[in-house]
Each structure stands twice: as C-alpha cells, then as structure tokens.
Amino acid sequence: MSFFKPKFVLLALTSLLLPGLWTSGCTGGAFSTDGGAAGSAAAGGGDNDYGEAGSGTGAVKCGGPEDCDDGESCTTDLCNADGTCNTSPKCAGAQKCCEGDCAECCDDADCDDGVSCTVNTCFSGQCMYVPEDSACDATQYCSAKDGCRARAACGILVDADPLAECDDQNGCTTDICADNFCRHDFCGKGAADPTLTMCCEGTGCAKDCCNDAQCDTDNDPCTVGSCKEGKCSLAPLCAKGQQCCPGADGRTATCGSCCSAAECDDRVSCTEDACGGGQCSHTPTTKKCNAGEVCNALKGCQKADICKDSSDCHPTNGCQLNPTCEDGSCHFDSCGAGTKCCVSAGSATSTSTCAACCDASECSDNIACTNDSCGPSGCNHEPVDANCPIEGQRCDPALGCVGCLKDADCGDGLDCTTDSCVRNTCTHVNTCGKYQYCTRYGCSTCVSDSDCQGAIVNQDAALPAGCATSTCVKGQCQTAAKDCGDFQICCPPYGCQLHCGIETQ
C-alpha cells in the first residue's frame, strides 16, 4: 500500500481541531551589535581583551561563546576560531523556529494541504491532515490525496475477493467491504491495534512518533529526540568526548572541548586564552611582556634577541609574523584577522602556524548532510546527497536535506497534475474534473474495471441483445456485448457469469 502525503496524520484528532501548540517565536537572523554587552565593544570606542581597540566595523570580539549571547532563542551563538562572534539560525531547512524549538509548524495556519475534506492541524510541531468523511456526500469518502471520492462497489461477484477489490494501496488505511461498498479507515479506526494512531510517510501507522523532531520534549538543549520504529527516546547532542555547552537562553547548545574562555587557562601569562569554535586557543602577545621581551607560547615572556635590524629577528614559531627590530628588541605580529594560531602538541619545541581553522571539529555548520573538514584555506562543507535519510532527497549546503528547490524539480511525467515545490517538498495536484483520475493517459474516468461497474444489477430489467460487459480501457470505461455460452447467464455490467447475485449480511 502506498503513502499519500509527505506528512503524518494522528487519527485521535479526527473530530477535534486542536489550537496551535506553539506560536512562532522567531526566525533567526543576523546578530545585531546594537544591544547587549557583547555588542557595545564592537560599536567603537574602548579597548577589549581579544583584539585591537573597537573600530566601529560591527565585528564583535569574543574570548568564548559567553561573550556572544544575542538574547534570541532561535539562534545558535558561537565564538569563531578568529575570535569574533557568529550567530546562525538554530533551525535548518524548511523547519520553523517556535520559541526556540525547531518544528514543521508553529500553529494551524502553517498547515494547508489544499484538500477540502481534511482537518489541517499543527500538533506538537507537526502538521496533521486528518481525512473527515462527514465533509463529503453520503456516497463518498474522504481521500487524503484526492479529496472526496465515490465509494467503490464490492462483494457483488461471488468469486471476487472483497478485500482485494477495496485495496487502495495506502499503508495507513484499513480497507473493508461493508454493505457492498468499500470503506477505508485510517490508523486507529477498525485496526487490530487501535493504539497505532499516527500515519507516517513510507512506514504506515505508528504509536508515538514518525520522526526525531517529535521526540525532543525534555527542554534540555543537550539532548535530541530519536524516533525508532514509532517509539521515542532521547540521545546526547554531542559526540563522545565532547562537552555540551548550553547557551545563555537555555534553549540552544554547542559542542566542543571547551565551553568558555575560563576553561582554557594555559598558565602562560603572556598568551591570550580563548574558547573559539569549541576549541581552546592560546595566542602569544608581546604586549603582555616587558620591554625587551617576547612571548614564547610555552615558556612565557623571554628576553628578546638583541638586534640591529629586522634581519636579526628570527621567529621561533609559525605564528610570529613580520619581524621588526625596535629599540634593540625583536617584535612580531600575531596571526591576522580571520586566522588563529594552531599549535601542534607532543614535541619539546612547539610547531605552530596561522590558519583559518586547526581541525575539523571547529567547522560544524549544523547541516547534517554536509561533510565538514578543515582545509588549507579554511573550513569546507561538502554537500553529500547520500547522507540524507530519505531516498531522492538532495543535500543543499544552506538548507540541509530537501525534496526540491524549485517547481522544475518536481515533474511527475503526468500532464494532468500541477507539480509544485512547496516548502522544499514536491506536491502534485490533480487538475482533472470531479470523480476523475490523473493517469498516464490523461484525465481518466477509471483505473480499474471496478470503477466502471459501480451500479448494482437489476435482475428484473429487460436485457439487451448480447451481454453487456463494462471494462476500463486506457482510462476510459467501455461497454462490449457478447452472447453467453452454456451454463452462463448475463449479469450486466459484469458480463457472462455462472450466476448473478448480491451477498447479503
């Protein structure tokens, strides 16, 4: 049986319209330096501990993520490896931010499948599209895909299998032949296990959840929800060996080997200790040494070499740049903007170099389907479609795993559907008339012979010459007549049969 929508449905809500459980709190955005303690230093004026005097350019200097709180629950606040603040939207792809929680929807207004007979509701951050048969005529049922459809006849032929006649190829319906008409009950209605009330894409009915987003309910930013086989559990946000660092708002968190600059003290008086990109850095600065001294990253302030000109000044590590001789002492510039000093440990003499990043752990972009790495020119984020959990999805480096980016990505090869990309998901709307199907033959009145044989046979009616048989040929009902052989009688519109009749209950 095939699934009908890229959503899930909770049958417990078929007669109840729940109000939106969340209201849209924020949608993220660029970090503003107009307010907050972190922004005041960057606006110009005073010196700070992590760079030159404020230049008025808007770049916020930081020693750790604690300096970068923007007061917004919908952003993740980071201290970059270069010592400047960076904020990014907490929610990726087509998700909305609902007061700090990432979800498909924040309220009912975010959910609309365009089908008139379904109840559209936002429940626990997920859109529900619940078919409601009472919204259709008495002879119809509500299909979550095609709207109100005529109920098909079944159980009329003695040799026919009523369940096979009513199979709608939908994994979330229980198909029943009752009173010679097909009925299609969604999850929880008439099923062997009525607790399976949720309809999930590709897997059918479930009890608790369809995806991970439904399971993150403990308000702990250091855990994430996990949905497996329809049941919820919680898993740590950070990998083994990493710390989880909750933000000031208590709704977001980052992972790394440090959470604040206070954890990065190397006990060397002339280095500037910072926690950037989740990693400790220790940048030597001669400014913290006395005249005639230079800062050694391992030993602290050391007496500078006596020099006459810059040719006498020899850097002791790769982070000492542009040597100059001033008043008999050597002076060196530290790593420039956008880079940091990367010191390789494990040797008696440190080996260091200036780079945009030191290792891949500093390069997370919070997009699950990209491979993050640290290269010579900085962080790289390679989109890999194979990392997406659903076949056919594409990895977009900005949005994450999406079904589509534009309408042209959604062609289904049928001329009678309108193919659209809505919130990065393909939709295919049937443009045929009422009670018509869209098939490879165009707008069709039938897809099987049963669509042409919906009338109940009147045994007392005068029979025409020959026996009428109604069948579906290339999407259109056609009637043919032939003479019945021995031991057969005519049963229009089913043709020659051993006997005609309707089973009674």
Image: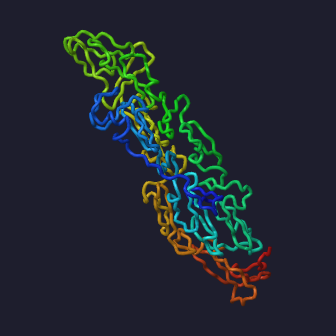
Q: In the rendered view, does 212 fall on the left or right side of 365?
A: right
Residue at image point 50% right, 49% down: 98
Q: Examine the rendered structure and indicate whether residue 95 appears above or below residue 12.
A: above
Q: Is residue 283 above or below residue 226?
A: above
- Residue displayed at 43% across by 32% down: 66
Whether residue 383 can be seen here: no
Is 225 above or below relative to 361? below
Task: From the top left corner, tell me how far across and down residue 292 is, in percent.
Answer: 26, 11
Quadrant including the N terminus = bottom right
Residue 204, quarter of the rendered image = bottom right
Q: In this view, does 398 lie to the left or right of 215?
A: left
Q: In this view, does 28 lie to the left or right of 113?
A: left
Question: What kind of colouring is applied to the model shown?
Answer: rainbow
- Residue shown at 31% from the left, 26% from the top: 335
Query: Is the residue 272 above or below the residue 474 in the image?
Result: above
Residue 337 at x, y percent in the picture? 31, 31
Which residue is at the front of the view, 196 or 57? 57
Q: In this view of the protein, which residue sits in the foreground, 285 or 114?
A: 285
Residue 177: horizontal and vertical position, in percent?
A: 72, 69
